[in-house]
Image (cartoon, rainbow, N blue to C red):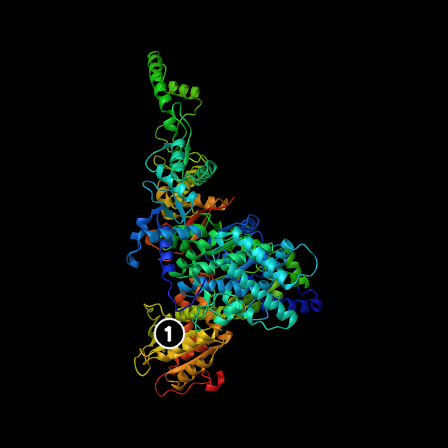
Amino acid sequence: MTATHSTPVPDTARLETVFGILTKAPEPVSVSKMASGMKSFGRCPAKQCEALAEGLVQSGRAHRFPPTSGKAFRYWAHDARAYARLLIEQALQAKRRSLVDVDKTVAKRIPDLSGSQRDEVLSELEREGRVHRWPPTAKGPVQLGRTPPDPREYLRTAARTFRKQFANVRGKLEGVGVAESQIVAAALAELGLTAPPAVGANAPPAAGTGAAPSVAGAAPSVAGAAGAGFCGAFDAAFARLDRLRGSHNFVSLVELRQALSDFPRAAFDEGLHRLRRDGKFGLSAAESIHGIRPEELQAGIREAGALLLFVSRKQP
Amino acid sequence: MNFQADPTNATGDLEAFARRFQDDNPFLANAVSDVHGVVIDVPDVHGKQFEQLIGYAEEVHRRRWHMGQVIWGEAGIGKSHLLARFCRWAEGDPGACCIFLHNLQPSPEALSRYVLKCVVNRLAQGRQQDFHGTQLYDLINRTVRHALKTYRPKTSRPTAAEVRECYRRWVDDFVAEHPNAGPDARAVYDVLFALFASAYNAKYYGGDEQVAAAAFRWLSGDAVERDEAASLRMRCPNDADAVVALAGSDAIETVLIVLAQLVRLYHQPLVLCFDQIDNLSIDQFRALTQFLHPLIDHAENLLVLVSGVKTKLLQMVEAGDILGAAWERIAQNEQGIGLDRIGPAQARTILQERLRAFHADCVRWPPSRERLQQDDLFPLGSRWFNDRIEPLPELRPRDAINWAREHWRERQSRLRAVGAAAWLAEWPGPRPTVDPKTPSAGDEAETLRRIDQQAARLVAEQHDRRLHEPEGLPPDAGNLCGLTLRLLERCVGDAWQYGLKSVRIPPADKAGRLPTYHLIAEPRSAAPCPALAITFIATANATSTTFALRRLVNDGATPEHGVLLVTDERLPLHLGTRGHEYLDELLRRGPQRFRLVELTFRDYAALDALQGVIGLAVSGDIEVEVDSSSATYKRVTADEIVASYHRQDCFRRNRLFGKIFAAPLAAGAEPCDGDSPSLGDFR
């Protein structure tokens, strides 16, 4: 606990280096990996690294995890819950997997983490929008994925059957002089759906639907942009971009203007002004460490002598 | 309406009103830089965020939990105002033990120790002795009473041995239940008890407080002598010259964990508030987050709040300048506590609050009372508000205050021009127009004058605040060195009559020995002035002082340097026999080669105030008006503040910097002017 100022304490330096390695490592590391990171101290045998890591575990600064192969334990500065988060996200990196599969993977790697703790970690990831639960299909179990459930995947089989039968019915009805538009309208009515916009119409997405920010295909007029269509598209674009940037509730106008490029500048500004007036979104000034880039200057809004560049969603 | 209808009554009222209006401007203050800087507060503005903060503080206490939260938003949005409001709430009941930290200047390696020192000094209310009655004493007292209640239910007066035994048992239980507190927890508790016992005996039995003083220094992160360590019942090194101090960040963390625990028994959470952390250098920021990461993980009953400009903090995080894991501990919620711009309605409430005191006087005089009844924004006026603020979807609180201040000035100017009676009769009067005599943005000299005026006012304000709260600036060589370095760096160059060629920290000794000098300042011309080596000492430890002086005496590598030894009057050089010998030898070298400057607290506060105002500029908190007609403001940069310091000769007027720039070490210079004491002064 105490030390003389004049006495160097090499073990403390080694201990801190090991701690640094365990903190920076993207996942739990083996003793041999730790040893290779200790080259600045000359040769540092694996045994010594293991002792240092165990010391950190004893003091609560690091955590020990079972071996993935062989007999060597692995160490990390982050706890079992953090590791479980990592494992779940890694498991879903390439494709969706069933909930049971994912849970088994985590339970196998971290046997000390109870079922309820695993559930908590999963719920946490779901709340953060990093993992999404896909409802079971007729044949498959509950799945987990990194993207929200895509309705088309669930409707594909039903749609295939419907298309076949619809083609058959349409042929018969057209043969007796019923107009195609009538047939389509009737089909939609039977399915309980409203008619889509007429081909070529530029109606913006419906307000408040949380529609995907795919503004491709939507080329609204200036007058329409300030209305509900802009609000929905802006809301969705903001949500998507904010998630991409770490969910700090902070998105640059440069990115938002790019994402909503189908809205002319005047329409965008007018729509945003209304959202600000309604207290839904707010702007804040450009205050970069590195100065303001030309594209930021271009995208920003000048107001009362300040260049406003970043959008935040206001607390309700 | 004719206010001259009854001249006999009206004249006195008019004069009184006019005097009151001309003498005041309730919108002068537009930034908060410390806990007590808030005079007027509107609870509705950022009220949700305030409730969030209280909720977090209560949660960490209730759940014996730990948490880090970031408060962020743009400059002028009200971050410091919110923290100040929170600190005022903390002073209430049940409140919280809130420690406000800002303008941290130590090197990254020394940052954690300085944070600890600030916390312990705040708890001890800046005292170096007479600890009875301080918050620190009360915390230990409460713990001792808690231990007695737990382990000795008898009501009779306990003996000293019983007190010690109960406390020991309580500590045993705590250490067993909290392995995360670290291996030093028991020693920290023992030293706290030693401080308590010594202060108690001094208060009630007239004992001295030497043990308490040593305990306080050790808890603050400073070194204590071997015999002092023995008096604190610590294991002592065999070397008679060795000193004992908290070793490393783990031990520092343990002291803070233990203090958080003591505060819990006081039924409050411990809250550490780091304001304007975007002012820290990248290395300092990294060091702070690395220190706070395990502290937040391991402490109970601890809330860490950091605040800064959101854009800058996110840029540092996204650039990978700090570890993601460390940042996640500090900002446990990615969105943090974000402060938004306010709407015109809230701006109106702020203005009304600021006008309240003025209105209280206005109702005493019938002419102004009538105007006030017509318009609750008198004398600014709702028309001005509707023209200037109402059309905006949102604005910063500071914008509303700045614009109101300028409009108030414009109204004052109009009153001077037309007289009080006519002014009231025509009120709200003609809409302001561009006055060709009013300086505008194009008038660079006028802008510089306003920057100078603003810089001088802020420095004086910051200086006063430090003088009122000396516990916020404890004596610390590392902080003083960092502060001096940062300000000297602003004097490198040849744009002024004086200045330096360079200033640097000497390279560290590979063998890990302590440095002889902390800074080397090279004058612009090599001759006749030699480079100046500066050493800072602020310790009550005679051994450390002796070693530092011995290093100066024995340094043969840089005889060409003049040496400036800087000390703090609150911790004057504590010299043993050998220390005296070394100091005598240094003084015998003459003022050309060695000088000693003992800074008063006023000197230190003046330096810190200079850097504090630079920090405000870095955070975007200083603005000056550049165009009166449109009330357009310019944000003053740190470089512009520094240039203003040079124009106003602020550096050379500072006592320490005056010594550095006055080249007294040049050959043939005048002997020392009183700073260097005679050989007898230290005996």
Return the x and y of residue B532 as percentages of the image width and height. Answer: 36, 78
Along the viewing direction, whichever of B326 and B221 lies nearer the viewer: B221
Q: Is residue B445 visible?
A: no
> What amino acid is found at the position of numbered circle 1 in the picture?
Tyr
> Which of the chains bears the disc numbered 1?
B
Vertical position of residue B149 compared to residue B535: above or below = above
Along the viewing direction, whichever of A228 and A125 lies nearer the viewer: A125
Q: Residue at x 68, y 64 (%)?
A: B365
Q: Name the residue beneath numbered marker 1.
A: B517
Q: Is residue B133 visible?
A: yes
Q: Quadrant of residue B85?
A: bottom right
Return the x and y of residue B22 as percentages of the image width and height. Answer: 58, 68
Return the x and y of residue B376 as percentages of the image width and height. Answer: 61, 56
Along the viewing direction, whichever of B497 and B623 lies nearer the viewer: B497
For mark 1, give the secondary structure: loop
Along the viewing direction, whichever of B325 and B628 lies nearer the viewer: B325
Is B441 left, or right, of B138 in this rendering?
left
Q: Residues within 10 Å of mark 1 (few under 14, many from 20)?
A: many
Q: Quadrant of residue B243?
A: bottom left
Vertical position of residue B346 compared to residue B589: above or below = above
Q: Residue at x 34, y 38 (%)?
A: A93
Is B94 left, or right, of A26 in this rendering?
right
Return the x and y of residue B649 as percentages of the image width and height. Answer: 42, 76
Count how many numbered circles sit on residues in the image: 1
